[in-house]
Amino acid sequence: MAYCKLDLCRPRSRRTRRELPKRHLRLTATQLTRLAVSYETGSSTYELAKDFQVDRRTLSQKLKAQGVTLRGQSPSWLLIDEMVQLYQSGLSLVKIGDQVGVDASTVWRYLRSRGTPLRDPNGRYNDSPA
């Protein structure tokens, strides 16, 4: 007898039951407050997601809903506009960075991307092309 891929003589194996998706945990108002405070005091989203037993992306959404500004995010267009206005008013890159909560090199990078003429350390504008 030739080997056949489909053997109808053998009993079918039992199928394993499909695992149902996990039920979403609902975070209470107290937990959301603790979550926001922990994040603002320096805990990472990965640590908090493990502690609260939620996905990191869900945790980020919850933080944003609480009005928390997430670390490591690109500045918005409005914030970049504010950086340009502050620079044109005479503030240094360091002072602007301190005011908006980013590093001075980040301010410099966004000013250059906007084509803003930059000053040298003595306060004079460079005439050389960027």
Image (cartoon, rainbow, N blue to C red):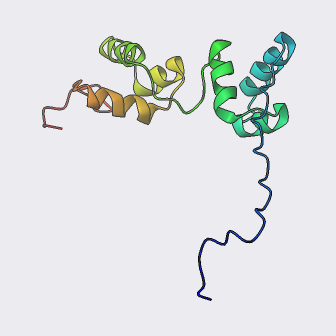
Q: In which quarter of the image is the C terminus?
A: top left
- Where on the picture, by quarter, is residue 62? top right
- Closest to the observer: 7 or 14? 7
Q: Would you say residue 29 is visible in this rendering?
A: yes
Image position, residue 37 (x, y; %): 78, 20
Image position, residue 118 (x, y; %): 26, 28
Total numbered circles: 0
Q: In this view, does 69 lie above or below 110?
A: above
Q: Which residue extends farthest bottom?
A: 1
- Where on the picture, by quarter, is residue 105? top left
Q: Is residue 84 above or below residue 3?
A: above
Q: Is residue 128 left or right of residue 64?
A: left
Residue at 78% across / 65% down in the picture? 11
- Closest to the observer: 20 or 25? 20
Image position, residue 63 (x, y; %): 67, 20
Q: Would you say residue 119 is visible in this rendering?
A: no
Residue at 81% across / 18% down in the picture? 27
Image position, residue 61 (x, y; %): 63, 22
Q: Is residue 58 left or right of residue 109?
A: right
Q: In which quarter of the image is the N terminus?
A: bottom right
Q: Is residue 78 above or below residue 23?
A: above
Residue at 63% across / 31% down in the picture? 57
